[in-house]
Image (spheres, grey):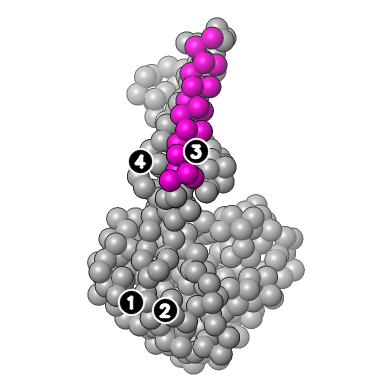
């Protein structure tokens, strides 16, 4: 699960011996290895009854990942193990709300204790509303950190877990086994950043997320209304249908193009730890406000862009 790449995370029900699942995972990896863009694969920790059995298959981009998954459909659907779920990660960020990816660097020699803390977290998470499962992947050549995947049914249920007292109590024991701070990412709140530091989970403030959405949504809506909506009305003259199509285009642009780009540009300001520093927060806020001024000036002074 490396930034700039695309990863499919496939989780399965535990059944039979771990050796049998290992053989199945190796078959999946061998099939993926001959596909264009293959970058690597990982097998999750299989020794714990509290953690899912899972496979992570990594490609150099999303297109190659989908090409392989379409070709390997029979292999994956016809697996001897019942699949629990499948999540996609693009540029290191889960596409599915309710999914959390946590990267850790365990202290040398304390790997078993680190897995034990993951089991303890899974035990506590089982009591949380909406918990679907979790898996832990050891380091690999293409990904030198431990990776933990935690799945909840909804974004709200994951957010409740991140803010819970149970998680706050469990994190210090885990943090004591790490050689550097955890890095966590979730698809919640339009790509908000989640950081776990000093035993606490921190999330991008909602006002910053709202400011970022305003900055990218305003020019997008203006351009769509000026240039795209007339085309939509030419083949969908009914207002109720034209509005539906226009919203679908706007949401697609926002989700897969504009928000990821804005998040990369404003990553430091959006970071709940780094961005909380007064200077970083002030400079970033001023920059976003300057962006407002620029887009307003452009749309207010260029006649061809006006409705």
Visible residue check, residue 69? no
**Apparent side of residue 61 relative to residue 243 in the rendered image (left or right):** right
**Apparent side of residue 18 relative to residue 144 in the rendered image (left or right):** left
For discs 3 and 1, the disc positioned in front in the rendered view = 3
**Apparent side of residue 257 relative to residue 71 in the rendered image (left or right):** left
Q: Position of residue 306 (x, y in %)?
A: 50, 11
Q: Secondary structure at mark 2?
A: helix
Q: Earlier in the sequence, mark 3 or mark 4?
A: 4
Q: Earlier in the sequence, mark 1 or mark 4?
A: 1
Name the residue rendered at 70%, 65% in the picture. 38
- Callout 2 environment at 10 Å: few (<14), some (14 to 19), or many (20+)? many
Name the residue rendered at 57%, 42% in the picture. 265
Q: Secondary structure at mark 1?
A: helix
* Residue 90, placed above or below residue 77: above
Q: Which residue is mark 2?
A: 174
Q: Which residue is mark 4?
A: 207
Name the residue rendered at 56%, 58% in the picture. 92
Give the alpha-carbon distance from disc 2 to disc 4, as whole Å: 30 Å
Q: Which mark is residue 170?
A: 1
Q: The N terminus appears in which quarter of the rendering? A: bottom right
């Amino acid at each position: 699960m490396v930034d700039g790449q695309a990863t499919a995370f496939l989780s399965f029900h535990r059944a039979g011996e771990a050796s049998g699942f290992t053989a199945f995972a190796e078959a999946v990896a061998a099939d993926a290895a001959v596909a264009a863009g293959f970058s690597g694969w990982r097998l999750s920790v299989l020794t714990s009854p509290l953690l899912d059995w899972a496979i992570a298959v990594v490609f150099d981009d999303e297109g190659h990942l989908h090409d392989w998954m379409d070709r390997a459909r029979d292999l994956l659907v016809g697996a001897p193990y019942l699949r629990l779920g499948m999540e996609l990660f693009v540029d290191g960020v889960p596409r599915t709300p309710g999914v959390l990816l946590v990267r850790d660097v365990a202290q040398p020699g304390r790997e078993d204790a680190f897995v034990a803390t993951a089991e303890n977290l899974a035990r506590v998470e089982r009591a949380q509303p909406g918990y679907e499962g979790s898996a832990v992947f050891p380091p690999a050549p293409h990904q030198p950190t431990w990776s933990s995947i935690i799945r909840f049914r909804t974004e709200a249920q994951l957010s409740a877990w991140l803010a819970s007292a149970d998680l706050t109590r469990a994190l210090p024991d885990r943090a004591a086994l790490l050689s550097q701070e955890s890095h966590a990412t979730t698809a919640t709140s339009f790509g908000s950043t989640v950081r776990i530091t000093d035993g606490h989970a921190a999330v991008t403030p909602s006002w910053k997320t709202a400011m970022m959405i305003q900055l990218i949504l305003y020019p997008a809506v203006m351009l769509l209304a000026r240039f795209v909506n007339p085309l939509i009305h030419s083949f969908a003259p009914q207002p109720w249908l034209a509005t539906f199509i226009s919203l679908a285009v706007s949401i697609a642009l926002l989700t897969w193009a504009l928000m990821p780009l804005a998040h990369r540009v404003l990553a430091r300001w959006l970071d709940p730890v780094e961005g909380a520093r007064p200077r970083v927060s002030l400079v970033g806020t001023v920059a976003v406000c300057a962006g407002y001024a620029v887009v307003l000036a452009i749309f207010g002074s260029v006649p061809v862009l006006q409705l």
